[in-house]
Amino acid sequence: MPADDLSARAHNGCLTGVVLSQRCDQPYHRVELFAEGAPKWLLFTDIILGAIGMTDSINQRDLVARLDAESAIHRLHATYIHRLGNGDFEGVAEVLKHAVIHVLGNEASTVEGLLAFFNAGLLVHGDGTPRTWHSITNQLIDVDPSDERASSDSYYTVHQQVDDFPLQPICTGKYLDQFERIDGEWRFTRREVTLRFAGGLQHHVKGAQRDAVAQTA
């Protein structure tokens, strides 16, 4: 009997010996039955390994789907940050065009509404940017078993430097995000921005956003 075979013996019955091939290069299992001294060969299609293989295949698909979702969500986060840092408010509104954004009690949606929201709430300096540097860390991404919805909980830190205002952190908080996958593409459906710690924000926010920060601080 080969060393990689599994054997079992049952006494007082017609089945006295079973050999199950475990070699993974075979498409089926071969089972040898000794009934009344006469060997009979039965070929079983991949019942056992097939079941295991099916489970492995499902697990692999789940893993691939999750990694695909996480990669897409990381890219959405990064795209938002890069465009915001460049002062590209139209590009930020495009990333969030299917979402509702909620910032300290103020909400906006649609490309036009989001563009108006950013223009009304964020200061732009001489180089055409907010002069800020956003970092996202500690991202927790949860993908729904349907692979059609997901959420994430992330820390953000914003640094800023302008004339007479040395480079320094000006605020930290969380992005609480929700996503959906439509036609194979992941997109934001909601972004809530919370404020945990606030420093000197006088060179970054204005209007309703400045008022909201003052009430929160």
Image: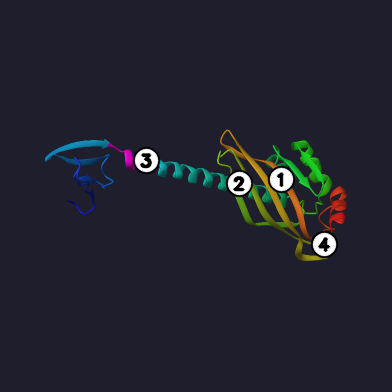
Indicate whether 201 appears above or below 87: below
Instruction: Left or right? Give the position of 180 relative to 62.
Output: right
Q: Label 3 belongs to which residue? A: 51
The residue depicted at 75 percent of the width and 65 percent of the height is 167
Magenta-colored span: 45-51
Q: CA–CA distance between discs 1 and 4?
A: 24 Å
- Relative to residue 77, is residue 167 drawn left or right? right
State the CA–CA distance, disc 1 to disc 3. 42 Å
Mark number, residue 200: 4
Q: CA distance from mark 2 to mark 4?
A: 30 Å
Element class at badge 1: strand
Q: Earlier in the sequence, mark 2 or mark 3?
A: 3
9 or 121: nearer the eye? Answer: 9
Query: Where does the image place residue 128, in percent across and percent down from the top left?
Result: 77, 51
Residue wearing tag 1: 191
Give the residue type that dot 1 points to.
Answer: Arg
Specify few, some or many for label 3: CA neighbours under 10 Å numbering under 14, 14-19, or 20 or more. Answer: few
Answer with mark 1 or mark 4, whichever residue precedes in sequence. 1
Label 1 Cα crowd, 10 Å radius (few <14 / some 14-19 / many 20+): many
Which one is in front, 185 or 125? 185
**Left or right of 198 in this view: 2:** left
Q: Secondary structure at mark 4?
A: loop
Q: Is residue 87 magenta?
A: no
The amino acid at mark 3 is: Ala
Q: According to the image, label 2 marks what residue?
A: 73
What residue is shown at x 39% (from left), y 40% (from top)? 54
